[in-house]
Amino acid sequence: MNDIILPTKKHFGEVTIPLPSSKSESNRVLIIDALTEGQNQLSNLAEARDTQTMIRLLSEDPETLDVLDAGTTMRFLTAYAALTNRHKTLTGTPRMCERPIGILVDALRTIGAKIEYKGKEGYPPIEIQGFEKQLTNKVQIRGDVSSQYISALLMNAPLLPEGLTLELTGKIGSRTYIEMTLELMKQFGVSYTFEDNIISITPQRYKNTSFTVESDWSGASYWFSLLACAEEGSFFLKGLKENSLQGDAKIVEIMDKLGVQSEFQEGGILLTKKPVTGLVSFDFTHCPDLAQTVAVTCALIGQKSHFTGLESLRIKETDRIYALQQELAKINADLKEGENETFTVIPANNIPEKVSIETYDDHRMGMAFMPLVTRTEVTIIDKEVVNKSYPSFWKHCILAGIKA
């Protein structure tokens, strides 16, 4: 593995970060583009490996779609291939084949797709064997497991002969990602209704359009965290919009309580230091990808906080709750599990002079622990892990003055 050693740095000047494009937006508009036979003008697509994998598989159209470790790509391509009657096998890395897909497959079978598991029931690899006719236009699907299942179905819904009505059962998690999908569909000419827990889309066609992908709020979160943990500095993050479709824009509200002032300006957002007012608790149900970043931030600045809405973290690139607990322990901090799926961040104390952080094949582990540089020398094991979503991350660290 190729590790990276980052020396301690507590002070920052005026730093400008040219953020990467949103992987979430990119992967959705690529599916929409495929459903309109590539007649759109798409710009600023993400450099993330997940997005580049999506682009390659859609353009090359191989018999076996190997998504590598890209969960979004797996879910989106499964629905796309099934509902457009493509005979494909979908597979990925060993970890990808441990991530469940049964809820999506069950929904697709209900609609009329023929899909078989090649190995363990409920998990990739899967073989899509066709879609002869639509059996129903009404499907129930759990809302508390993965919003990507729901988004995968929604994007294909307009082209189904009878359209589709989805009833989301139970607690709806990552609702902002579902709303992002619907709003992107709307920008490509598709209308919908979303009332209570029911989403309805009638048969219709996407309209060709031009679309520029916004910068990535998930990627922005690491710079918010770094400034919150630093003693001084200011960061200008390029390409972010105040009225964003991305749920992770919630980082503005969270970090306002943890010592970061945000000011939207032309071309991006300016971050400056401010007093910490305290984050007593936060529900990450609709922005789970921020949890690692905020947990590390709270641990480093001495903020005890209670987190809820972390259920989906156990089925991400790794079991992120376990990974956080293991790595926070190295700085004498903890993410302590309590009753009713509540977790408490126990702040760090007596941080060692050097810390080595395992990344568990999870890009967000590598980036979330980068702000440790404000307290100690930190080694991030397997620096290439960030390529999944933010390949230029370490180059941007150099822009901030963090030089390996």
Image (cartoon, rainbow, N blue to C red):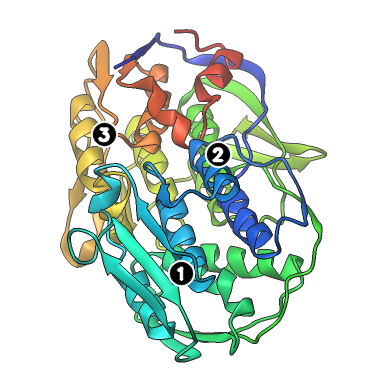
- Disc 3 vs disc 1: Cβ atoms closer than 8 Å? no
Binning the other alpha carbons within 10 Å of mark 3 as few (below 14), some (14 to 19) or many (20 upward) gives some
Q: Residue at x 17, y 60 (%)?
A: 120
Query: Could you tell me how many numbered marks the image carries?
Result: 3
Q: Amino acid at mark 3?
A: Tyr
Quadrant including the C terminus: top left
In contact (CB < 8 Å): disc 3 and disc 2: no
Q: As displayed, is residue 14 above or below residue 256?
A: above
- Res 7 → quadrant: top left
Residue pointed to by mark 1: 82
Examine the rendering and report whether any part of residue 116 can be seen.
Answer: yes
**Residue drawn at 53 percent across, 14 percent down:** 11
Task: Residue 110 in the image: state x and y as whole percent.
Answer: 38, 84
| Secondary element at image label 2 | helix
Q: Secondary structure at mark 3?
A: loop
* Position of 227 relative to 289 (above/below): above
Q: Residues within 10 Å of mark 2 (few under 14, many from 20)?
A: some
Camera-near label (3 vs 2) is 2
Mark 1 falls on what kind of element?
helix
Residue to which mark 2 is pinned: 52
Which kind of residue does numbered mark 1 sit on? Ala
What residue would you read off at disc 3?
A: 360
Q: Amino acid at mark 2?
A: Gln
Report the Cα–Cα distance between label 3 and label 2: 22 Å
Residue ID at (37%, 75%): 114
Q: Position of residue 12 (x, y in %)?
A: 58, 16
The CA span between labels 1 and 2 is 21 Å
> In the picture provided, is 200 more to the left or to the right than 149?
right
Considering depth in this image, is 330 or 322 the residue closer to the camera? 322
